[in-house]
Amino acid sequence: MENINSILAKLYGEKAVAAQKARYEKAEKAFEDIFGKQENVMIFSAPGRTEVGGNHTDHNRGKVLAAAVGLDVIAFAVPSDDGAITVKSEGFPQDTVDISDLSVKEADKNTSAALIRGVADGLKRDGFSIGGFKAYTTSNVLKGSGISSSAAFEVLIGTILSHMYNDGKVSAVKIAQIAQYAENVHFGKPSGLMDQMASSVGGFIEIDFRDTANPVIDPISYDLASSGYSLCIVDTKGDHADLTPEYAAIPAEMKSVAKFFGKNELRDITKEQLWDNIAEVRKACGDRAVSRALHFFDENGRADSEAEYLRKGDLDGFLRTVSESGNSSFKYLQNIFAVTDTRSQGLVLGLYAAESVLCGRGACRVHGGGFAGTIQAFVPDDLLEGFIRKMESIFGKGSCYELYIRPLGGTRVQ
């Protein structure tokens, strides 16, 4: 059996093993303090993710390039026969969900209880077994960071139920789809599928969502750590509160362009169709919708290109395309700041600062959904110390995170 040091190195990188062992020991003690000592404790982990390419393409059945990272949510859990899922997450009130009633609860929208109930509901709807369990969880996935703490939590719950009640046979793809169902229907957030898929599957992956029931997933083997570059996420300390309308407007506007042509999503039309009818589409849908649709078509191509560059080991081509993605997101997708709060433009300042340090090397772009939160940067190792120093001088100590690309998605740790 693989020893714990080897497992932790695979999940978090060699440099993090000692810190992670201490973290797991602390979590085990917290579990025992709450639920008492147990004989059959299982340990689970589900990672956050970083979006590398395909900014706001998944909700219109587009293509993305994503990767699981070494920031995760872990759980110590035991099965229970009380008909309830009880989860105590560090720093939050305990949730108890009665699995005999998995209907959508309006009062629970936007809560972790809704995510737990939604995952259980999704598994049951798809013919899988569910049951009760008690768990203690702790997370170092940054909330509001674009690394997707909610997707990691959803995938964690799905992974627990898969191993406890389905012999671990619920596929990573299915867990991701059920996690998206929980977030869309029970939690009430209109997210795409990329966050959940990257968390569930692990590693660098290119995903084609043309058929959302059967997405095409293509893992890519690339060791960024040995390339002479580091992947950094910078938290610009933006507030995600009340930004749901901004996020929801992007898929809605893109789909309004598709509906002009009698289709539901942009994947079912072509850029040429839009160009040939652009005057009429502008009148019907508005200029921002058209601009966002144009971003969608180009970004799909960029996701393909980025994946191919990584497969070939062409880092220069990859970084150039990442920069193009960032440029398009700023100018055409327009998800760098909220039009309802023009005074708060941390992402704009973060991108300017990143470009000033990189001086034409590496690449930077908005990270995740946008409007507030984080930027992503691929930083040459010789510039890393200065990059971190500059970012922390603007956004505070601890605002710049160097990420490890994790080869495993949602998993049972033992």
Image (cartoon, rainbow, N blue to C red):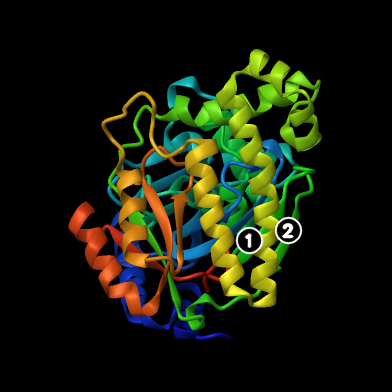
152 up-or-down from 380: above or below: above
Q: Secondary structure at mark 2?
A: strand
Pick the front one: 374 or 118: 374
Of the two numbered discs 1 and 2 in the rendering, the one whose residue sits closer to the viewer: 2
Residue at 46%, 37% in the rendered image: 335
Which numbered dot is residue 217?
2
Residue 250 percent coordinates (x, y): 56, 30
| 28 with respect to 117 (left or right) | left
Looking at the image, tell me whether mark 1 or mark 2 is earlier in sequence order: 1
Q: Can the viewer see residue 410 in this picture?
A: no
Residue 127 percent coordinates (x, y): 75, 42
Circles 1 and 2: CB atoms closer than 8 Å: yes
In the current view of this chain or complex, which residue is farthest to the top?
A: 283
Q: CA distance from mark 1 to mark 2?
A: 9 Å
| 139 with respect to 363 (left or right) | left
- Image quadrant assignment for residue 201: bottom right
What residue is disc 1 on? 201
Residue at 69%, 54% in the rendered image: 207
Residue at 69%, 42% in the rendered image: 297
Disc 2 residue type?
Answer: Ile
208 up-or-down from 309: above or below: above
Disc 1 residue type?
Answer: Val
Pick the front one: 127 or 100: 127
84 up-or-down from 168: above or below: above
Pick the front one: 388 or 406: 388
